Amino acid sequence: MRLKKEMELKKSLYKVLPAVIWRSAEAEGLFRGAGIDLQDGFIHLSSADQVVETVTKHFANQDGLLLVTIDREKLGPALRWEPSRGGELFPHVYGAISMEAVEKVDPLPLGDDGTHQFPSSTVD
């Protein structure tokens, strides 16, 4: 449980998704999930320690992505830390995320080498 407590102390969580999906959520005022989120019944997020691997594994070579930074504390009881890759705990949100929980939205462009270029502020 020590790992869970350490992860819960980090303030920001991240969602990576295509810009077009995020812009629809902004217009509605709520993000209800995309693709795999809707399929699984919860919104997949990543901590600062997990987001680069998530992007590498699930979004390789995809252009037009955004990195949405979310304030963990504003998610309330809808946030749960659950085992995923090899038992590692990942943040999942059961319900919609309001725009009030969003700290910022950054583009996640592909660099010349084909990898995504993260903003320097990604790590808490």
Image (tube, helix red, strand yellow):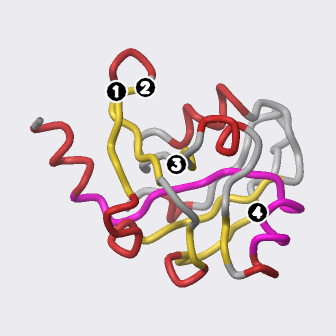
Residue drawn at (84%, 61%), measured in percent from left and top? 19
Q: Secondary structure at mark 1?
A: loop
Q: Please tell me whether mark 4 sits on a helix, a strand or a loop.
A: strand
Question: Which residue is tagged 2?
Answer: 84
- Closest to the camera, between mark 1 and mark 4, is 1
Residue ID for mark 4: 107
Q: Is residue 35 magenta?
A: no
Pick whichever of labels 2 and 4 is earlier in the sequence: 2
For numbered disc 3, what is the local secondary structure? loop
Q: Is residue 121 left or right of residue 9?
A: right
Q: CA distance from mark 4 to mark 3?
A: 17 Å
Q: Is 19 inside the magenta-drawn segment?
A: yes
Name the residue beneath numbered marker 1.
88
Q: Residue at x 42, y 48 (%)?
A: 47
Q: Position of residue 61 (x, y in %)?
A: 84, 33
Decide which of tag 1 and tag 3 comes sooner along the chain: 3
Disc 2 residue type (three-letter): Ser
Three-letter amino acid code at the position of disc 1? Glu
Give the distance between the C-alpha atoms of the residues marked 2 and 3, in whole angstroms: 11 Å
Q: Which residues are magenta?
A: 9-25
| Contact, mark 2 vs mark 3 (Cβ under 8 Å) | no
Q: Quadrant of the C terminus?
A: bottom left
In the displayed structure, 48 sits above or below 107; it is: above
Q: Is residue 64 left or right of residue 45?
A: right
